[in-house]
Amino acid sequence: MGYRVAVVGATGNVGREMLNILAERQFPVDEIVALASRRSLGSEISFGDKTLKSKDLDTFDFTGWDIALFAVGSEATKKYAAAAAKAGCVVIDNSSLYRYDQDVPLIVPEVNPEAVHGYSKKNIIANPNCSTAQMVVALKPLHDRAGIKRVVVSTYQSVSGAGKEGIDELWDQTKSIYNPTDDKPATKFTKQIAFNVIPHIDVFLEDGSTKEEWKMVAETKKIIDSKIKVTATCVRVPVFVGHAEAINIEFEDHLDEAEARDILREAPGIMVIDKREDGGYVTPVECVGDFATFISRIRQDSTIDNGLNLWCVSDNLRKGAALNAVQIAELLGREVLKKG
């Protein structure tokens, strides 16, 4: 016996990836429906060896459905998620709408699986920001061992984090560089993204940080420990898929790099590739399509007491979005719903 699952936003990048991952991981599905806006009505989407035709989200009745994976923006989520939850369907939401609601658990299954039981307050579970998800997978086992005081992170985030428009803009601008008569000015991003990096993701806040940077701070505190201090600089880079992060960590207690390497090797969801030689590390292009969060360049930071540096890479459409949502559904099935 399995679940009746709805994928909301099934025609988008993350929605399609959710369907791929549900099939790859053989999630126990009795019935599945692909939902999208009316303009995408009838679009065909793959689910394993099947082809689904999208149905109209606006008229869909969630009554009798077990789980809804939402991969639409906050505005659409605000309109439809509460209705789905009220109908008895557990919503796993990929937008930022519910992440900071104290009555909605924010979950990365490798990090805080026990939080899943808090879903019942609103029948909603939130998926974290893509850059946060991979970072907390790396931080949690180290925090359990030595206690993290402070994190300084610089991100190198791919354009797919900005959706299909971000991918299209990088592609079009890259081609236009070699064809000067075909100028492609920035529309999705604030400056040219091709052959460039942009230290600006989401809107600016009063203190000079961006909302993307604030998300990493707030979400890390909610998921792991409110006492951890976090400061972030989030940068968009001309990479199609895969986010990378340079993370500097200050611990309460001393943690040797060799022990840290061993801890991370044993931690769930992590693959350590850390050879001190040319190519002995993982880059974004190599992590695409993989489930793991890859850790490389593990080394002591001699400028502070109890400091460590590492490099963290993951497929942002997978662990940063679709995979984490499916893992939450799996956790929900094991711990709460217990059907299949």
Image (cartoon, rainbow, N blue to C red):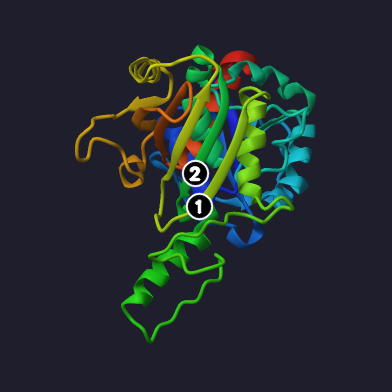
The residue lying at 36 percent from left, 84 percent from top is 180
Farthest-out residue, left: 278
- Expressed as whole percent of the image width and height from the top left, the position of residue 184 reads 46, 77
Residue 268 horizontal/vertical position (percent): 43, 20
Residue 128 appearing in the image = no
Give the residue type that dot 2 points to: Ser
Task: Identify the residue position indicated by label 2 in the image.
Answer: 154
Viewer-nearest residue: 215 or 35? 215
- Tell me where residue 107 sits by quadrant: top right
**Element under label 2?**
strand
Q: Position of residue 29 (x, y in %)?
A: 52, 28
Q: Residue furthest bottom?
A: 181
Relative depth, front residue between 70 and 272: 272
Q: What amino acid does circle 1 point to?
A: Val
Q: Which residue is mark 1?
A: 235
Is residue 104 placed above or below 332 in the rendered structure? below
Residue located 36% across and 41% down the image: 289
Q: Secondary structure at mark 1?
A: strand
Q: Is residue 115 left or right of residue 78?
A: left
User: Going 78% across and 40% down the picture, which residue do you hit?
Assistant: 83
